[in-house]
Image (cartoon, helix red, strand yellow):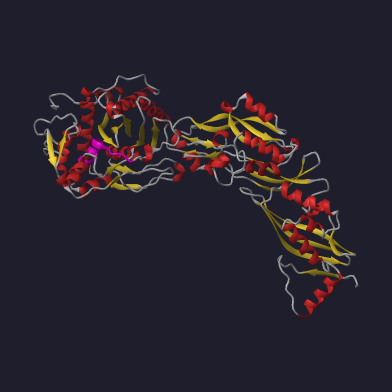
Amino acid sequence: MRRPKGTHTVSPRPLGRFTAVGSALILAATLAACTPNPSPEVAVRSFLLAWQDGDHEGAAAYTDGDPEAVAGALTDMREQLDLASLRFGLGHITRDGDAADAEFEVHADLGIGDPTWNYTGRMPLVWGPDGWKISWSSSVLHPDLSENERLAVSYESQERGQILDREGEPLVSADSVTAFGVLPADMEDKEAGVTQLAELLEEDPDPLLNRVRSAPPEQFQPLVLMRGSSVDATLLREAGRIAGVDTQEVEINLTPSMAPFLLGEVAGTSEHRVSSRVPGPYQAGDTIGLSGLQNIFQHELAGSGTTQVVSLDDSGEVTDVLDSWAGELSGVIDTTLDAGVQSAAEAGLATLPGNGYMVAVDAASGEVLAAANASGNTTDDAALTGSYEPGGAFTMVSALAALDSGATTPDGAVPCGFSAEVGGRTYVNPSSGFLAGEPDLARNLAFICNVGFVGLGSQVGADALAETSQKLGIGAEWQLPLPASSGAVSIGDAEEDVASAMIGEHGVRVSPLAMALAAGAVADGTWHAPTLVRQEGPAPAGDGPLDEAHLEVVRTGMRDAVSNRMPELLGHGGEVYGQAARTEQDGTALHWFVGYRDGIAFAVLAEVEPSQTLWSQYAVDATNAFLASMASGGTPEGEAPTNEADLTGSEEEVAW
């Protein structure tokens, strides 16, 4: 058979099955009978298909190189880049006598979380006794790769961003972290060594191996982060026995300085076992937000690493950057939190005998200034999501409903006797007392007269109570970046249902956040949806101003409630408005204080053992400590508990 001569270009076609008809089919059969590679196109296609399928020995057969060396080079490339997949597209083939040159498109998927490396490759071909073969050299792998060079992927993580308070001050402190990693060049067996390190640190070895396989061998690769306090000499000694393992000390923004459930946990440390808990595209050694704002804004806070495909010489030094993908810079999250208010809230909750919650908002905007739990648990978000009976703390809502519905007027008398019976249930006041004379609505509110509010229920009605609740944001539709509840008011039409709802029991459920926002609406005259993160934009506006004359009645009752029943709250400056109440839900006593001072509205909820409820009103104690801390700018000294007599008022006002 004659050798092909002349110069021509073969049109590019996608890799795949050949089809032919007529004389072309006869010619192809004749050529195939004479030689295994009758044309450059057949040789190139066959080589690329075998390489793409991972049949490196088969691919080597289409080259003029040493089969073992070629197969090894193809295997090394896949491992050096830790490829998830490799695909090719056939380009132009130019032939000149016994030589040819072929272009091909390479699509190398560098794996989860990494880009796809696309480039144009070239391979020379020569005609020989066995037909057309690829003239093998390292440049077949990449045009810029020289002999004695290899490929690698370099990955550089971003420094984790900050979460800031409303003044731009950081809320996350930097921790000293030990980075356990490896120098790949010093490892006797990468897979065995990395697996041994993963087992020692109780991590999944696969993500760690993925990074090590493709890394420059002379560069330290951080794989697992562990807080300094968790690293002891024994662990360091055992890790040091593994060939190629090393450690470095780094500083990473990990620990919230306050509001831990809001800010959230950051993973990346061995104690979190990130690889088994956090799905998604992350590199070994990355930091991951597990909860709170750290989780919701993971992308913004972590950014993305800079990835480079590089060539290395025999000594592991970078000789060229073949391609680079700049990562996105990590950023900051601007919150509405006020560090001083948050610190005071946490100081207030520290006085509680058990768990509890506090939320403070800016009454004029709905911006969340503080949200805290007494447990310190990063998963305890009931300050935002809780579903609690508000009990008598709800009377500020039902008082406004009574006025808005026309059930009473600002000056109208609202009798408050010893008891009232509605629907077969007998209602009494908190200490079984009564209000003398002809008390108005504000006075009923000041002394939390259950009997008076229950008596108004039938005139207010379920619809009006639900409508006023909605005006104060309870059950309203809004959204924060974190899970949160606006509460719900779902009242039956029966007279006893409305009576019970008037004192915050039947069908009424709220979160501390919802009650703080309701108190803010009373203070400001307009309800505002909450805002926590400024990047999320302003919260939706409420329905408009509330009836100012009706609000003044409620404000008067809340001011008198403090001055008559909780005068200790007035000892820290400013005028305090509020309502305190106790109720029980699911075997737990709930102590509430809901109110405002100087434009800051807040709600405090204490969860207390029922046997302890006669000792103190713990929500009032926490409020007292909160206000004292706000006044002093620091954590207050211990305050004397509020006793039951402090809540009953003078005998001139009420006979209990």
Q: Within the image, what quadrant is residue 410 found in?
A: top left
Instruction: Indicate the position of residue 364 as horizontal and vertical percent values.
Output: 33, 39
- Image quarter of the N terminus: bottom right
Q: In the rendered image of this protein, does residue 612 appear above or below residue 594?
A: above
Query: Can I make out residue 223 in this image?
Result: no
Residue positioned 45% across, 30% down in the render: 258
Magenta-span inclusion, residue 389: yes
Q: In the rendered image of this protein, does residue 151 appear above or below residue 178?
A: below
Q: Would residue 568 be found to the left or right of residue 444 on screen? A: right
Report how many numbered discs are placed on residues in the image.
0
Residue positioned 29% across, 21% down in the render: 641
Instruction: Indicate the position of residue 465 as horizontal and vertical percent values.
Output: 22, 46
- Image quarter of the C terminus: top left
Query: Can I make out residue 437 in this image?
Result: yes
Instruction: Indicate the position of residue 54 as horizontal and vertical percent values.
Output: 73, 55
Instruction: Indicate the position of residue 255 as horizontal and vertical percent values.
Output: 51, 31
- Residue situated in front as seen by the camera: 569 or 377: 377
- Residue situated in front as seen by the camera: 195 or 639: 195
Please state the extent of the stretch shown in magenta in the rendering. Answer: 387-399
Q: Within the image, what quadrant is residue 17 found in?
A: bottom right
Q: Would residue 542 be found to the left or right of residue 22 on screen? A: left
Q: Residue furthest bottom?
A: 22
Q: Would residue 394 be found to the left or right of residue 234 on screen? A: left
Q: Within the image, what quadrant is residue 423 found in?
A: top left
Magenta-span inclusion, residue 63: no
